[in-house]
Amino acid sequence: MLGEDFINFCLRIMPKKKTEDTENSWRKIPQSRTRRKSSPLARKRSLRTLYLSSLALLGIAAVFVLAAGGWLLLREATRSLSQGLQSPVLEDEKVLFQTDGYLTVEWLLEELALTGAHQPIFSLSLTELRERLESNGQVDKAILAVLPPDRLAVRLQERKPVLRMVARNSDGERMRLLVGQDGLVYEGYGYPLPLLRSLPHVDIDRVSHSDHGFGQLPGFPQVAELLRIAEEETPEMYRTWRVVSLRQLPKIVVQSDNVGQAIFPDRDFEENVLRLRDLVRGTRREGYDRLEMVDLSLEHVPMRPSSR
Amino acid sequence: MMSKSRVIGGIEIGTAKVSVLIGETASGKNLNLIGFGQVASRGVLKGTVYEYRSVNDALQEAVCAAEKMAETSIEGVYLAYTGDHLDGSYNEAKISVSSPDGVVSKKDLERVEENAKAKEVGKHRIVVQSLRGPYRLDGRQVTQPIDMTGNELEVGVWKVHGDGRRVSDSIRLLNGMNLGVEELILSSIASGQMVTKKEEQQRGVLVLDIGSGTTDYALYKDNYVVRAGAIPVGGDHLTNDLSHGLSLSRREAERVKIEHGKALPTADDKQTTVYLEGGGAAIGERSLRQLAIAQILEARVREIFEIVQTTITTEFLNKTYIPSGVVVTGGTSKLPGLSELGNQVLGVPVRRGQNPGWVADELKGPEFSTMLGLLCRGFDREKESAGRETLPGGGLLSKIGNFFGWRDL
């Protein structure tokens, strides 16, 4: 039976001889068509159909893209949220850290007490973290942001130290402290030694305390302004400044390698810095190594040169 | 699944007019008539193309008009064919059933049909349409003999053939407009499908499509077309006769034929006068006698029926063979009294054909029967191919078969 079926199948699929092939039918006349111009209306209709089809296709594509986009966004958001909720902020690679100073990401993690904490990133209070960072004297301003799904971005603006000091705490321990441009005293972290050595010391009776550390020194920002001008206008002379005393405020007394005491008034810093430079140069020209004392707050500066 | 829409056109290049009817089929499920164009024919004589360029121009005009109305282009053409060069020949074949147990197979059918068609039609002649009659198995008439038992299988084929060059000219005309001819159909068969019912075709009926140049006929029996062809006389001869007999121009004669023509004179005609301009007895107005008009037309119509009688022969043209009588269609069939005269001459009932009820009013006239029939044939073909496509396994297999040149798997 299988054989018969197979034969029938073969008979069916074999090319059938058309009965008309045996006769001289009109179908044997070759029909060669040349291109015929469609009627204007037919062309118009074709164009309209093409236009509408294209519009429909574009519409479908737009809907598809929107739907797919929405779905992807939703999926990404869900994934981010779940990842954000589950991932701890532990690794430094998950913290984007940027600063204009010398603090490091290790310092940041330790300062924020995040190292080793299994804390979901979405549970962090950025305000609290910012306040904690800004309570550190070295940090002038902090900006924090959560980057979904599981990253924390921190950007710091650090204080620039203008003076340094050595103090003793209540326990009598020696502390190396720095003074910022705004007069705030803070414990410095990560500064290179050459930078620290280049800073003059500050001479003051005592340093006040605030809630989170030390307070601000008096006489600022005038002191910072004097130092800035001296550094910019007479960098060579500034490098010889060793101590800035605030004991006679509002007068600022500077001790340097060449001058025992240079007394600055709380104004006209640029003019007085240049006067001091000229005085030091004049003193050298006259064969003296050092000026004992110069009071720049007076119109006619009294000078007491040291011995030749 | 989207329905496959196809725009097909029925085209008739007649002696008096070139007509184009456009239809749109959707997966062979329905047929919508969407465009129609008709222009006066030029360069056609007795259904045959004589001036290629004139016909080409007229055809272009008609196709453009129809496509403009349809607002689309024709994809495939069903062309009505007639002409004074057409002739018919009948041939029968008989074979012994190949199977030892006498069961008729499909192969037997193909073989007997091939044998019946094998008769040469003559040099430079080409077959326009082959019309197979019913099978006979051991003398019994059977519609579908496959799986029936018998010894001898017979079939008869009526072949309508024409001058190869003239047929080729008609096809080239359409090819020149980038239109492919999907099927050539005799005008009488196309119109016959519209004006006769299945029951009439079963019982026996003769369709006469009296056009301008030719009178096409199709004889139906047992739902088969057993004879078909064209006689080179038609409505134009009536116009010519009026023109000669009444010394009228062809245009005047045509108008007189349409407005005052009748195929059988009546008693009133002797006293009735018709005026050429239709304005009454005005000065210079030419008058014609109604009786003269009727007598001229009667003579020619009678002659047409007599030629039909001679052509078809009384073997077929009798009440026994065609109990449903004769159905006349075509533009000339509108001539009053034509049916009565036909009845007198042919001795069988003659009635004027009418298109089916579903046809729109503007296409109801007998002059549209042929084009409607063409589109119906096209629709049937689309339906068949749609049916084939939906047959189980007919999709991919069929396509593969077509790729390798196999047909009708």
Image (tube, coloured by chain):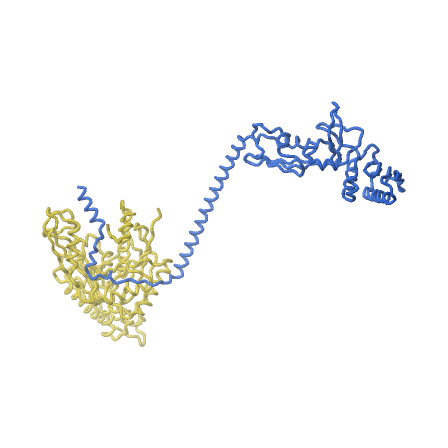
Chain colours: A blue, B yellow
Q: Looking at the picture, tell me which residue is in the foreground, A160 or A259.
A: A259
Residue B269 place in picture, x, y as percent: 22, 68
Q: Is residue A217 above or below residue B313?
A: above
Left or right placement of residue A39 versus residue A267 in this view: left
Residue B202 place in picture, x, y as percent: 17, 53
Q: Is residue A224 visible?
A: yes
Q: Looking at the picture, tell me which residue is in the foreground, B42 or B299.
A: B42
Residue farthest to the bottom, as pictured: B284
Left or right placement of residue B123 versus residue A45 in this view: left
Q: Looking at the picture, tell me which residue is in the foreground, B404 or B171.
A: B404
Q: Is residue B402 above or below residue B294?
A: above
Residue farthest to the top, as pictured: A171
Q: Is residue B266 visible?
A: no
State which quadrant residue A205 falls in. top right
Q: How many marks?
A: 0
Residue B337 place in picture, x, y as percent: 21, 63
Q: Looking at the picture, tell me which residue is in the foreground, A203 or B181.
A: A203
Name the residue rendered at 27%, 45% in the picture.
B393
Name the residue rendered at 33%, 57% in the picture.
B75
Left or right placement of residue B200 versus residue A129 in this view: left
Residue B133 place in picture, x, y as percent: 16, 55
